[in-house]
Amino acid sequence: MIDPMRDFFDPIVPATVDWTPGGPRSGEYDDGYFGPHGGLAEAQCVFIEANRLRERFAQLSHHQVFVIGETGFGTGLNVLLAADLFAQCAPAGARLHMVSVDLHPLTRADLARALTQWPQLANWSELLIRHYPPAAPGHHRLHLTDTIELTLMWGDATTRWSESKAQVDAWFLDGFSPAHNPAMWTPQLCRALADRSNPGATLGSFTASGEVRRNLQAVGFVIEKVKGFGHKRHRIVGHQPGTWAPQTLVCGRVCIAGAGLAGATTARALARRGWQVEVMDPEPPGSGASGNLAGVVYATPSPHLQAQNRFYLTALIRALDWFESLRFPSHPDQGRLAGVFLHLAHPRRRKNTLAAHETRGWPEALLTRINDELARLEGAGYIHPRAWIEHLLDHPRITYRSQSLAPNDLVAEQKSVDAIVIATAGAALSFPDLEQLPMKMIRGQVTEIEATAESSAWHRAHCHAGYLTPAINGRHCVGATYDLHGQHQGVVPEDDQANVDQLREHLPEHWQALGGKALKVVGQRAAFRCTSPDRLPLVGRVPSLGAHIYLNIAHGSRGITHTPLCADLLADLICQNDQVGGLGVDTGIERALDPLRYLEKKTAI
């Protein structure tokens, strides 16, 4: 279990950049991001050629993966050069995973300005800028192409690399010079790099500092001083003892039980990694709690960056990146990502939101304070969940079977596939060893209100004690009730009135624009949310059910926001990328979501 007193992360402060005629310089470290000749030729020599990447990429075969680790992301030039080379010379079906760290990452605007230096990398620069995450602490997974992934770890290099599970084949030891930034070249960091190195792993660096050489040699690297680039006299190359051999990712067939948001995102995450996916559900996709007309993509800000709140923040960032990557929504009937207004009527929500903004616990690029009563989440929005699910399942490697996965079919199904994912919300409790999980089924009812001429022009969702979405197909969604004890399966007229009364209390002008006392309720939908006692999903392996059985449930009312990150985490575990390229989340989040946090308690009892 996580020790909540030791799992807090510090906010990330973006880099201060001084733009000089010689290129961008770090205000924190008084050093340039690249050399006076533009950096590209130097990066090619010092990192790409020093690690013999062309010949090693060409040696890969289908499903083999090459992992690059970097100690200073900076402008991203090194990883873009590696991605470009990999696309040129790696065989089809091979994969590249790059992992980089930065304590003071560039803002998106500064990154875009820096990347204009290299027009020959314009296509890769555009991809990086599109997916570039805001300055939120922890890990961010970027899917640049179907075969090239980048994990950015925002935070202290020694801490992040010490906790990483990646097994690195080649190192880019970049970052500012030892004289300007000694923390990037310490014995502790060198120890972490050695621990994360495969046999035969290579390294390249622009520096030839005697202290750096000694620190690397002390942890087992064989270091050689060679001719430097340009005006620099020397630089270093090196390797770990042993024979290098490419790593292989697991790929096969997976059965996913459940065609809601959790099942559909997991299916897409595995399909994009080459798996053949069969989704099973007796009902059409998006028929359960995922089937509302509209849902809001958002999270509740907090200045407290322990694992739970980091999950909420990182999950929102990951969800927005999935929408960008998959070009959804593509028209207003699928929703809009134009921002979400947060109404801070509740004292605790107001305190946390304003503190998250003040401390930069939430990055300024994501959270805008309008006044003491109102904030806005930039890039968030609302979507049509069923349309999103259909979009996710529209992939040549995904098939759908109208059938349930019964508990007594589990053994037989395991013989025909390489992994099984149970993503059936509360129905997962029917499986052996899961029946005693302390899940709650909480009833909620959403009310649909007919749009008016005025309300049809609204583009942003509003979250208060409830929520109001702009119209989809001429209907606004208002809700939702949160009935901890209700067991009624159908809709209840009193719940519609409760939703309308809450709208009138918190958004009186919007209530009036919808018709006031004459507004028209034209539909409603009731469903049961599956939640856990700590309000976090259960995502990970369930060893007691079988060696390759996984769980993805308990997303409550935030499934739209949470499921993309959880799908990426599951895909890493199923492909065994957690022991190759590392995880797309920090270890604190991984442990916070692990189903064993409850199953182990049950076993102990």
Image (cartoon, rainbow, N blue to C red):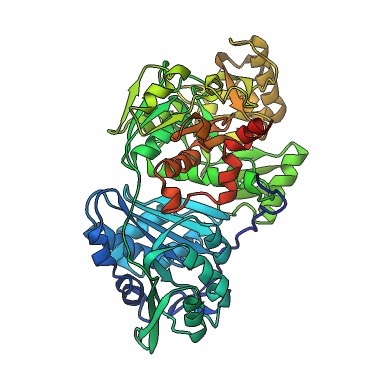
Find residue 133 and report its horizontal and vertical position in percent.
49, 53
Q: Where is residue 408 in the image (x, y as percent from the top left)?
A: 45, 17
Q: Is residue 307 visible?
A: yes
Residue sitting at 70 percent across and 17 percent down?
Answer: 485
Q: Is residue 596 above or below residue 468?
A: below
Residue 306 % position (x, y): 66, 49
Return the x and y of residue 592 as percentages of the image width and height: 61, 42
Q: Depth check: 577 or 23 in front?
A: 577
- Where, by quadrant of the figure, is residue 360 drawn? bottom right
Q: In this view, does 381 lie above or below 580?
A: above
**Which residue corresponds to the image point at 29% horizontal and 66% vertical from the top-left?**
53
* Residue furthest out toward the right: 347
Instruction: Tell me which residue sits at (41%, 48%) in the image.
Output: 577
Within the image, what quadrant is residue 455 found in?
top right
Left or right of 452? Residue 207 is left
Can you say which quadrant of the picture contains the C terminus?
top right
Frontmost residue, 16 versus 303: 303
Q: In which quarter of the image is the N terminus?
A: top right
